[in-house]
Amino acid sequence: MNIPGQAAEELNAYSIWPENWARPMFEEFEKATGIHVNFIRFSSGEALARIIAEKNNPQVDVLFGGPVETHSAGIKEGVFEPYKPPTYDVLEGRFKDANGYWVGIADDPLVFMSNAGFLKEKNLNPPSSWYDLLDPAYKDMIQMADARTSGTAVTRIFTILQVFDRDEDKAFEYMKKLRANVQAYTKSGGGGTIPVGLGQAGAGIFFIVDALKTQQEGYDVVVSFPKEGIGTSTEAIALLKGAKNPELGKKLIDWASSPAMQNFFAKYKINFIPAHPDVEIEPSLAEVVKNANIFPIDSVWAGENRKRIVDEWVEKVLP
């Protein structure tokens, strides 16, 4: 509890989670600890670029949320300070960096999301294969995120690479074919959800948390999964090297990586799969994913190759 007249303890964060998810979490953290979180929201690519540019004079203490490929790329750039919270030992291996540079706070699979009216009009079933998205019926009707700014896009690209067993020639050949059906590449991962919801686009590839939010808002959309499999990315949190408030940053990491925060996902209708084993997945979310072929992205390989692969995507696929 804060003493009247005494300034509240504060820390600073860049949040990759949108404000409508990050703000309630930070408000609950402040209620629990008395520590206020000042935050600015950026997409993954923007946040990564900022913390690299600010490496010698960090402006924030914590990078909050976002696909772990972003954090793995940050390790390569030397921007994080290792820290293992009390929850570290109970987290599954894929929810923590071996050296403690990040820990997982949630799991977020990719999905296909289609407009139900579009499917009916074109006499299509919801896509159940990566190859379904190459159907000419989808020409100029697919929206997905731009890998120059969006972590969702990076996860999508590394998913496709894993579907093709990291055969980069085959994976990029597929992505070039898919390009013919892409109407727009959006700045943020969820940027295409409303156009698909409105029927301005027919389908897209999004994180499940964005797709189910679109359903919750009343849009007539259908979520499906490809039989070949689709990637899931750990949502992570990390302490900045040279943080000005490292002890407060550690308290946020302790809280976020524990049931204390992850039990709030269901309350606030945030459709992440909890990373902590003691937090149960919300039943309706469990129903959506129960028969899906979902595989984790190799975060170490993705982090080490992120820049090279994104540059190749920009050169070969984007034009």
Image: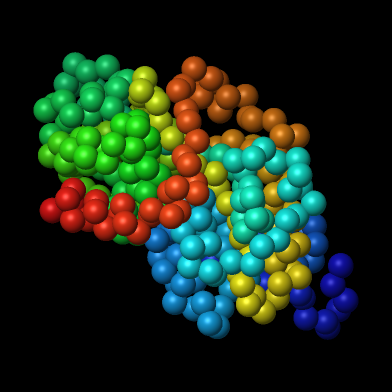
Determine whether, in the image, residue 147 is placed left or right of residue 91.
left
Image: 248 above or below 187: below
- Residue located at (83% from left, 83% from top): 5
Tell me residue 173's x, y (percent). 18, 38
- Please tell me whether residue 70 is drawn above or below residue 105 in the rendered image: below
Q: Is residue 192 above or below residue 289?
A: below
Image quadrant where residue 111 sits: top left
Note whether residue 194 is visible: no
* Front one among 94 and 134: 94
Task: Residue 159: name its quadrant.
Answer: top left
Give the residue drawn at x 27%, y 41%.
Answer: 168
Marker count (numbered):
0
Q: Is residue 317 left or right of residue 67?
A: left
Q: Quadrant of the N terminus?
A: bottom right
Q: Where residue 200 appears, x then y in whole percent?
A: 22, 40
Question: Which residue lies at the image location 73% right of the left edge and 48% below the top edge?
Answer: 88
11 lies above or below 214: below
Residue 223 coordinates in the image, percent (x, y):
39, 27
What percent of the width, then of the height, locates residue 230?
Answer: 40, 31
Q: Name which quarter of the figure residue 277 lies in.
A: top right
Depth check, front residue: 6 or 60: 60
